Amino acid sequence: MYDIELRHLTAMAAVADEGSFGRAAARLGYTQSTVSQQIAALEKAVGGAVFDRPGGPKPVRITPLGTVVLAHGRDLLAKAQSMADAVDRFKAGDGRVDIGTFQSVSNVIMPLIVRGLRAEHPRCDIRLFEEETDQPDVRDLDLMFFDGRVDGDVEHRKLFDDPYVLIARRGTFADGPVHTDRLDGTPMVAHPPICDQARMEQALARRGVRPQIVCRTGGNETVLSMVRAGMGSAILPRLAIHGADIDSDATLYVHELEPALPPREIFLLWQAHRTHSPLAARAIEIAVEVAGNIVQPIVNSGEVPV
């Protein structure tokens, strides 16, 4: 049975549909002798005749064994065609890509990546997985955005530096840059101490600056709402406040920090030695384009992004 090939089944289906070896050969673009050879090879593999051949103008008739073989053969041919179609779509970039992300990247960068991929490959399947963690796992993902390097068998592509700014209620500090010394003991709203938040707080501590953390929350919008409510100020990466329309918010003011804190580094990660699908490879290219053409000028401009 292991000697059965798809070409044998293709010939059998054509003979069954056309009722003769000659018409099957014409449909397949073969000679009649080639079709006869394919059927003979199939009959040898299954151990019996799959067609009765009455001779003359009478059509060939499928045998009981042939009926069994043809039923399963058509299933195999359909699955083979489905696989061929799926491979063609995959090669064309119409497959699936799984991307790990986090909220500021999801809000600013991912819409541009998704728009670019969908414009080129309308049938592609893009799935996003958002998680805030110190130990990201890239094994089940095609690529992942993360604010730091990761140990292990992981490749890194740095996209940009994301500088920190101070968000405060207007009047809390004088307009303009704020020296980090002023933040010692100051009420602050902050993200949970994971990922780059912990590194930022450690950088402040090395300067002898220990703000009074009054509330921790993982949501960027929640942090800004807490600042508006007067709970305290907040140190956030510029990317985290992109699109928050702070320029038109009479309640809030964005201060540069003096001296500047080490910026948050945004990386693109993927499992080392992994062959990318065409869609994943294109997603990486678009991510680099977005970082270079849009994100980097924004975070390096010294202006609040809008």
Image (tube, grey):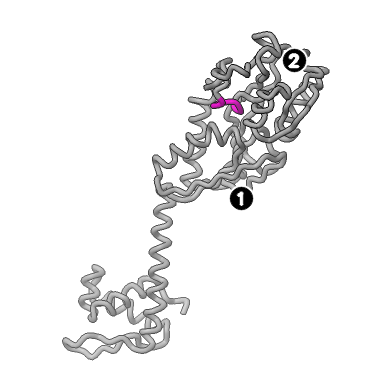
User: Considering the numbered disc 1 on the image, is that residue within a helix, a strand or a loop?
Assistant: loop
User: Which residue was labeled with disc 1?
Assistant: 140
The residue type indicated by label 2 comes to Thr
Identity of the residue drawn at 47% across and 39% down: 114
Towards the viewer: 190 or 170: 170
Residue 1 placement (x, y as % from top left): 46, 80
Name the outermost residue toward the front. 229
Residue 287, relative to residue 256: is it above or below? Answer: below
User: Which residue was labeled with disc 2?
Assistant: 180
Identity of the residue drawn at 59% across and 27% down: 239
> Is residue 231 at all visible to an observer of this figure?
yes
Earlier in the chain: of badge 1 and badge 2, it is 1
Q: Residues within 10 Å of mark 1 (few under 14, many from 20)?
A: few
Residue 106, relative to residue 297: is it above or below? Answer: below
Residue 173 placement (x, y as % from top left): 70, 12
Q: Which residues are magenta?
A: 239-244
User: Considering the numbered disc 2 on the image, is that residue within a helix, a strand or a loop?
Assistant: helix
Identity of the residue drawn at 63% across and 17% down: 254
Quarter-wise, where is residue 62 in the image?
Answer: bottom left
